[in-house]
Image (spheres, coloured by chain):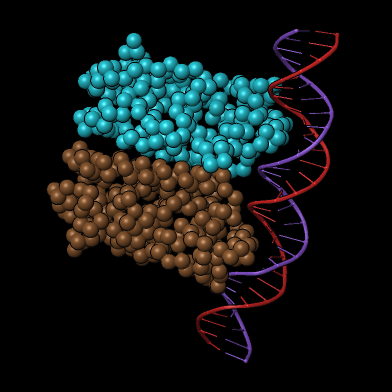
Chain colours: A brown, B cyan, C red, D purple
Amino acid sequence: MFKEALEQHYGFLFEPTLMEEILRFGSLKKVAAGQQLIEIGELITHMPLLLSGAIKIMREDDHGDELLLYFIEKGDTCAMSFSCCMGGTKSDIRAVAETDAEIIMVPVAQMESWMGKYKTWQRFVLDSYQARMKELLHTVDTLAFLRMDDRLLKHLQDKAKVIGDDHIHATHQEIAYDLHTSRVVISRLLKKLENEGKISMHRNDITVIDL
Amino acid sequence: MFKEALEQHYGFLFEPTLMEEILRFGSLKKVAAGQQLIEIGELITHMPLLLSGAIKIMREDDHGDELLLYFIEKGDTCAMSFSCCMGGTKSDIRAVAETDAEIIMVPVAQMESWMGKYKTWQRFVLDSYQARMKELLHTVDTLAFLRMDDRLLKHLQDKAKVIGDDHIHATHQEIAYDLHTSRVVISRLLKKLENEGKISMHRNDITVIDL
DNA sequence: TACCTTTAGTAACAGATGTTACAAAGCATA
DNA sequence: TATGCTTTGTAACATCTGTTACTAAAGGTA
């Protein structure tokens, strides 16, 4: 039963009849950190409502090169799904659980009918689109206007924030994948950040001091 | 009177009653190439429906550095406005007419009421959000995965496409602003593209051969 | 034509990032 | 402890991009 969690996170948003429908058609999904939720090119059949945890959204090019786009946070404005869950389209992104997470999966069919029936749902979907758009704009800013050292620090700060812990458990290689660069570059810049007193490092562990 | 142009571009999309409302509340705006339509931070009061021409959407950082995000094309899937025209928010982007353009300006107030009344309008807004999202993803891909020479060629191809002419009238400096780099870099890379036979150049004029 | 402004070409250099190769340190386990 | 795998540190170098400075060409105008 996930009634309580749903109430807690979305009760103030949706009217009672809509909450009932979500309870009836939605299913609770628990995922462990690292688990993949959706792959690029996959058909999107459900829209996720995040109850707890955090999801990272990745993009990939033809060569298999990856890039982290943004995190969807637990307790976010009210985390919408992904960029593109309307109308039987395929996913443009990969979604991976950054932490353990609880998600309500709503079938897309219901979603479309709710758009007509419930004003609050309509508002929710539009707001979510808007929020995702803003995230993407930030991603663009980061790529266009920042150098790698600032991107790295920002990434560590973001990551510390979404996992709610200033200790980040990750290898340099994993960070390099997220930022689409090489391990050596990350090691070099991490050392620089450490010398500047912004982080401290141990094997598999980075502590963000400058939050 | 812009009834005919409206019919031609949006008639197949919207039901007759909605078309009437658009005619009643919307106003036609003609803008010349280069004219600014909206500035970052400005309150958005109207949603634009593009009838002809092309609009370029720019982003800017704190230091005044610019970046072209994407073009909104004449005859596009049915060009939606900007990223963020819902609910009295301020603009995250700058919009500048890339060519002469004709636009119907619809007050935001109407838009919100139409969301409830007209299924076709609802669909239109959602599809537009989705299309803008895809454009932004392409922008991210370009920034993250391509080097400047490929970005430049892509930019020239895109630009040739939206103006409907393989002759591009622009200085190297103007191109540098769009791609957020320096004039010297653009000159260097243009010369390289010319040597590779992909473009030809004259003062204030670049012809894209490899379309 | 002479002059001026705008635009473009080029060299020389600096800095950021990416690559390769190898060594060293940390950790797990036989 | 000895061994092997993973992770990190570092050097040396290549390449890409950005910067400065100067020259040259194109076009407009007196």
Q: Quadrant of residue A149?
A: bottom right
> As rendered, which of B133 and A46 lies closer to the eye?
B133
In which quadrant of the rendered image does the N terminus of chain B lie?
top left
Left or right: C13 as drawn, with respect to B47: right
Q: Is residue B143 above or below residue A2?
A: above
Between residue A44 and residue B171, name the one nearer to us. B171
Residue under the image location 26 percent in, 27 percent down: B110
Location of the C terminus of chain B (image quadrant)? top right
On screen, residue A7 versus residue C6, left or right, reads left
Evaluate whether residue B210 shows in this view.
no
Residue at 40%, 23% in the rendered image: B50
Name the spot of residue D19 as percent of width and height, x first: 71, 41
Asked if residue C4 is positioned above or below residue B195 in the image, the reply reads above
Q: Which residue corresponds to the image point at 18% horizontal and 60% vertical from the top-left?
A: A3
Which one is nearer the viewer's eye here, D20 or A131?
D20
Location of residue C15 with respect to A1 vertically, above or below: above
Displayed quadrant of residue B12? top left
